[in-house]
Image (tube, rainbow, N blue to C red):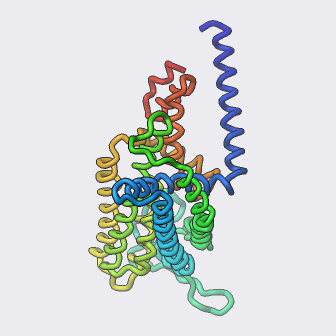
Amino acid sequence: MTKGAYESRIQTVCLATLTIVVVAVAIYLLRIVLVPFILAAFLALVLLPIVKFLMQNLRIRRPIALVLTLFLGFLSVIGVGAFVAVSVGQFANSAGEYEEQLTKLIHKAEISRPVQAIVSLVGTKAPLKPNEDASVEKANDGGEEAMPKSPNGFQTSLLLPEGAINGIARRLSSGVLSVLSNGFLVLLFTAFLLMGSTTRTTPRKGVVGEIEARVQKYIVIKILSSMLTGFLVYLVLQFLGVRFAISFGAFAFILNFVPNIGSIVATLLPLPFVLLTPDVSMITVALALLLPLTIQFCIGSVLEPKIMGDTLGLHPVVVLMSLIFWGMLWGFSGMLLAIPMTASAKIIFGRIDVTRPMAALMEGRLEAFDEM
């Protein structure tokens, strides 16, 4: 490589880095407008086929078809939003009880003999003798019985600081409510986008057509699979008698939009209530863990890829990095929008000569480094 080509490549990398930083700052500062607009754009992609169906198959005039579609979209958004808001609010109100249950569960684990043996092996204190019980501290002020202290000196607060679950519940509630609070602005943007769209009998071509087709297919399949996942998880937990089954079903619906991480979190959320239910059997505990996990796996890893095929073409590492990037910029809304926006960016990068190697890297083709 000549000196001029080497310097040119350095300049290109520096300019690309500066551009990414400037764009990231801009989309962070404009998030109040950009988040509802992008949500509206994706919602319009879902509603546009309904407008076409009403016009082409039922011979309904365009203005009436738009009004009917917007009314249907309005009812759907309000209905799902109200259900999710009530479920998340119910969980947030019981966050203190959930934290207490989780603390008890962690403490039960820490005073168990296998855990004591492991901690004693790596720590300074010896394991308990067979006839030795865990000491119980008395509260200093009222003499009430406090949480039994672990004999190996390990503190539960190191694993679960006080108020951690309340903080998570508040952040999750504020994240969901921030998405729902933009509902009016989203519907307003959606109405203008649908009115400004053209009803075509043939698929749109070019970059816009490819983005529209791929993102539309992804969103529709993701919505249907998330609804199915949430409903099945609710049925399973309700059958097993788990408290707040409808809330955990709503969490499964919401978190299914966050690939990989969301399904794991949704599966583990009900466990503290299941494990600390009086007289619970090990079969119930196993079913409460394995059945939702099986549902998540079958729908997320078998059914969705089979239906979607290679719709997005993103490497799993790119999916994870996009979730982190957009989550840092836009919070929970960014995590919901991360995958379709990253897929759209990949399509655009693939159509430009300079950024085509970047699109190949996003697909996981490392040989693209040779083209850079």
Rendered residue at 46%/67% (across/down): 72
State which quadrant residue 273 falls in. bottom left
Which quarter of the rendering shows the C terminus? top right
Rendered residue at 70%/51% (across/down): 30
Let me know if residue 168 appears in the view: no
Looking at the image, which is closer to me, 244 or 309?
Answer: 309
The percent coordinates of residue 21 (x first, y second) are: 69, 38
Looking at the image, which is closer to me, 31 or 53?
Answer: 53
Let me know if residue 11 appears in the view: yes
The percent coordinates of residue 209 (x first, y second) are: 46, 39
Residue that protrudes farthest toward the top in the picture: 2
In this rendering, the count of numbered labels is: 0
The percent coordinates of residue 137 (x first, y second) are: 58, 83
Left or right: 134 in relation to 221:
right
Which quarter of the rendering shows the N terminus? top right
Residue that protrudes farthest toward the left in the picture: 283
Rendered residue at 71%/44% (across/down): 25
The percent coordinates of residue 32 (x first, y second) are: 68, 57
Q: Is residue 138 above or below residue 99?
A: below
Looking at the image, which is closer to me, 341 or 171?
Answer: 341
Left or right: 132 in relation to 103:
left
